[in-house]
Structure formats: structure tokens, C-alpha cells
């Protein structure tokens, strides 16, 4: 509730995703390990003052949505207008104020939600908008420009659109009487009553995922928002395999696990496990038995022009940085609910001069981990991307670097530990930066 008034929310997710170009509608694609609509729903539930959420869902997907969301689910209509109306009459207990939001806008903020609710109480109806950075033109028919309105007088509409419930129901009922069946905007229906609509400032990050490009951009936005995790669970008494656990970040992970009362099993050449020998690696995991989690920290780096690499060096770099990690993920016997944390590198975002093999392998680690998170819902699968870190491998290849600009391996290990203590999330890409 807000100011003693009951607040409801409707998430519109009845679309078929035709513009997305995939048989699976966009709201059901995964973003950082969760379906897009789940991220959006969580933003509303985390507000804490919204009394009831209704999902207006495409009829073909109701069963799946009911399995994943413990809220009211109603069948959406053939149009946005009809889905909105069905959501309004679908509340178990009618609210005083309602926020109507696109389920494919997962980056809505708590500030936007609260200002919408309070704005609806004050105005009766509000729309979430942001100023337009582009010049907009008026071109009826799309053939020629008839006018160029002043940019400062135009705004770009987002959602939520929020209302006093009696007002938005009146607007919908009038539209139905007038034969209006496919309005793309609830605020337009209120304007048709001759009522004012206020404005709540939106956010550039509050994007609507409509195309594959939008989904890619959303992944990048999620990376910007993702903080270093601080899981609330415990690793005490649990057993973890740490590949590359005798040096650099891996050794720091082992020390931290042991400090927390866990058993860390380092796996590296020093302990008789060679990532360049796949059959031996598979056998090592067979001997290890059941574990609670796997942390892949191994890495190898060589800095020189491609023409100077031997075929054997190329094979070893790929085996240590990628192939061995894949085999470890395949062969490790991890208990249900356990964890896999793979380490990549900040170089994964683009190929780096003189060490493109390493960069490419680390990009593959990110892609593989995201895929594995979807394939293994019984596990919690994440990738950690550290900034430049003070490890023997780093010092050997870049001896002139200022040590104070590098991460301490323990900082990376703490991020890994945070993920190992988190029993809920999966599919996260966690960047660890200096001071984070």
C-alpha cells in the first residue's frame, strides 16, 4: 500500500514476438540466466508495497508461467488493449491504483515505480516518459515529411502507465462502447475522456526488448548493473574442486574456502592433473567422486605475434583456457543445487593484440557458461570476469605494470565465494573491478 491505498500491477506479456523473429516470444527468452519476464516481475515484487501483481499472458504459455511465477496469471487478449482490460478485471481484490507495465522492460527502477504510484494518486493518470535525443519528424504514410516538431516539446513514452483504477476502467469501458478495440496506449484512452495525464521521468536504461539487438543490449546493461555478489548461505562442510587451484586466483580461492570451513581440492599439474591431457582430466574427476561445486581458475597466456606460435603452443593454450574447462564441467559429479563458477578475463570483450588466442578462449568461456546455465537448471552456473589481476602469469607477461593498479587475487576469490554462497541465482556474469 501507499498512503493507505491498495496498489496493483499488471505485466503485459501476451505478445507473440513476431518482430523478435523467433518461435519463442521475447518475454520468455533468458537474460542472465532468467526469463525476461521473471526479471521484470522481481523488480515489482522487490518494491515491497505492491499488493498484487497480475500477469496478462499469451494463452499458449499460461501453464509454464504459472509454474515459474507465484502470482495471478490471466489469459491475455488478441490486442494490447484487450490484455490490459483483462488484467484490470483479473485482480483477486480490486486495487485503488494500478501500474501497467510491459513485461519486456526488465530494467524498470524502484524510483520509477514509486513515482508512478504517487503520480497516479495525484493526477489520476501518469505516463513514464523521457526526453527525445533525436529529432522526430511527422510523415503520414511514411513517404515524405510534412512537419518537424520542436524536439523539446516531444517525449518518448515508456511504461509503466499508472492510474486510479476507477478512471482507467471508465476509459476502457468508453473505448469498448465507442468501438475502439486496438489502442496501443492506455493513456490515450484516458485522454479520450478529456482527462489530463501527468508525466513521470523514465530512464534511458528502461528499454523495451523487441528485437534480438535489444536482447543483446539488455545483456550488456545487466553487466553494468551487476554488483559483486554477497551470498547469504554457507560453504562450511562442503567440498569444492578448484581447477588451477595451486597458483594465482585459484590458490586464493582455496585459501578462502578453507577459512570458511569448506574442503578445497586443488587440481593442477602440481597435484597430478594436466589440462592438456583430456583423458587424464576425466579420470581425475572420476576418482574425486561427488562434490558440491567446481571452480575453474586455470589459465595460460603467451604474448607474441600469431606467426611465432607453434601448433603445439596453440593447442596447449586452447586446452588450458577452454577445452579443459569444458571437460571439467562435463565430468565433475556435482550434487543437485551445487555450483559451477568459471573464470574468464576482461579481454573477452574484444581480441587483444599479441594474445588473441587467449582473448578468444576467454570469450568462449563466457558463451559456454551462459549456455550451460540454461542447460543445467539443477545447478547454479556463473562466470566471473576479473579486471587485470596481480598473478604470477600476469607479472611474467607484463613485468612493467604498476602493481597498485592490479586486483589482489583475494578480491576475485571473494567474488567467487559470494556466488558459491548464493543458492538462488544462475547465469550471472560478474565483473570484478578494483575497489568493487
Image (tube, rainbow, N blue to C red):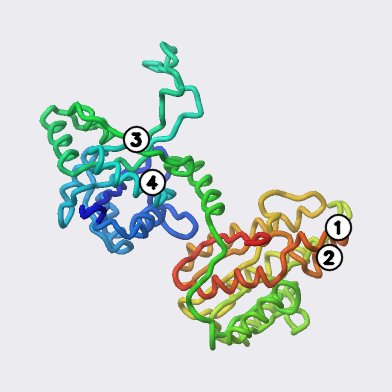
Q: Which mark is residue 212?
A: none
Of circles 3 and 1, the one toward us is 3
Instruction: Give the quadrant of the C terminus.
Output: bottom right
Of circles 2 and 3, the one toward us is 3
Nearer-N-terminus badge (4/3) = 4
Q: Are marks 4 and 3 in contact (CB under 8 Å)?
A: no
Q: Position of residue 287 (x, y in %)?
A: 63, 87
Residue at the spot 68% in from the left edge and 64% down from the top edge: 322
Of circles 2 and 4, the one toward us is 4
Badge 4 element = helix
Instruction: Give the quadrant of the N terminus.
Output: bottom left
Determine which residue is flagged by label 2.
395
Q: Nearer the viewer, residue 302 or 428?
A: 428
Nearer-N-terminus badge (2/3) = 3
Badge 2 element = helix
264 relative to 314, above or below: below
Q: Position of residue 385 (x, y in %)?
A: 64, 61
Determine which residue is flagged by label 4.
112
Nearer-N-terminus badge (2/1) = 1
Q: Nearer the viewer, residue 228 or 89?
A: 228
Amino acid at each position: 500500500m501507499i498512503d493507505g491505498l491498495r496498489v496493483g500491477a499488471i505485466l503485459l506479456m501476451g505478445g507473440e514476438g513476431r518482430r523478435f523473429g523467433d518461435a519463442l516470444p521475447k518475454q520468455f527468452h533468458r537474460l542472465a540466466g532468467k526469463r525476461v519476464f521473471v526479471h521484470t516481475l522481481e523488480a515489482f515484487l522487490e518494491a515491497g508495497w505492491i499488493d498484487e501483481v497480475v500477469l496478462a499472458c499469451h494463452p499458449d504459455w499460461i501453464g509454464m508461467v504459472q509454474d515459474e511465477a507465484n502470482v495471478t496469471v490471466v489469459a491475455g487478449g488478441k490486442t494490447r488493449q484487450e490484455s490490459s482490460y483483462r488484467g484490470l478485471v483479473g485482480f483477486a481484490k480490486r486495487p485503488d491504483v494500478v501500474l501497467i507495465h510491459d513485461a519486456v522492460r526488465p530494467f524498470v527502477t524502484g524510483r520509477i515505480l514509486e513515482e508512478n504510484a504517487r503520480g497516479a494518486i495525484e493526477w489520476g493518470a501518469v505516463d513514464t516518459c523521457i526526453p527525445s535525443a533525436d529529432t522526430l519528424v511527422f510523415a503520414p504514410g511514411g513517404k515524405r515529411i510534412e512537419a518537424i516538431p520542436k524536439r523539446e516539446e516531444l517525449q518518448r513514452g515508456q511504461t509503466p502507465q499508472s492510474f486510479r483504477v476507477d478512471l482507467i476502467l471508465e476509459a476502457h469501458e468508453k473505448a469498448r462502447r465507442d468501438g475502439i478495440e486496438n489502442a496501443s496506449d492506455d493513456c490515450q484512452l484516458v485522454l479520450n475522456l478529456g482527462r489530463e495525464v501527468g508525466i513521470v521521468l523514465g530512464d534511458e536504461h528502461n528499454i523495451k526488448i523487441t528485437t534480438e539487438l535489444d536482447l543483446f543490449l539488455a545483456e550488456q546493461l545487466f553487466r553494468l548493473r551487476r554488483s559483486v555478489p554477497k551470498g547469504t548461505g554457507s560453504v562450511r562442510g562442503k567440498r569444492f574442486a578448484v581447477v588451477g587451484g595451486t597458483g594465482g586466483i585459484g590458490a586464493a580461492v582455496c585459501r578462502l574456502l578453507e577459512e570458511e570451513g569448506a574442503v578445497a581440492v586443488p587440481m593442477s599439474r602440481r597435484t597430478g592433473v594436466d589440462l592438456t591431457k583430456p583423458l587424464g582430466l576425466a579420470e581425475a574427476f572420476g576418482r574425486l567422486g561427488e562434490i558440491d561445486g567446481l571452480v575453474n581458475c586455470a589459465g595460460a597466456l603467451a604474448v607474441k605475434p600469431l606467426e611465432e606460435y607453434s601448433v603445439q603452443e596453440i593447442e596447449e593454450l586452447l586446452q588450458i583456457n577452454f577445452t579443459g574447462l569444458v571437460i571439467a564441467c562435463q565430468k565433475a559429479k556435482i550434487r543437485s543445487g551445487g555450483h559451477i563458477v568459471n573464470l574468464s578475463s576482461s579481454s573477452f570483450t574484444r581480441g587483444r593484440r599479441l594474445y588473441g588466442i587467449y582473448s578468444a578462449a576467454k570469450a568462449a568461456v563466457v558463451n559456454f557458461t551462459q549456455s550451460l546455465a540454461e542447460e543445467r537448471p539443477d545447478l547454479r552456473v556463473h562466470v566471473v570476469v576479473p579486471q587485470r589481476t596481480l598473478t604470477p602469469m600476469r607479472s611474467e607477461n607484463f613485468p612493467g605494470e604498476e602493481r597498485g593498479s592490479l586486483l589482489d587475487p583475494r578480491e576475485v576469490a571473494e567474488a567467487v565465494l559470494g556466488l558459491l554462497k548464493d543458492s538462488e541465482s544462475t547465469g550471472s556474469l560478474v565483473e570484478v573491478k578494483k575497489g568493487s
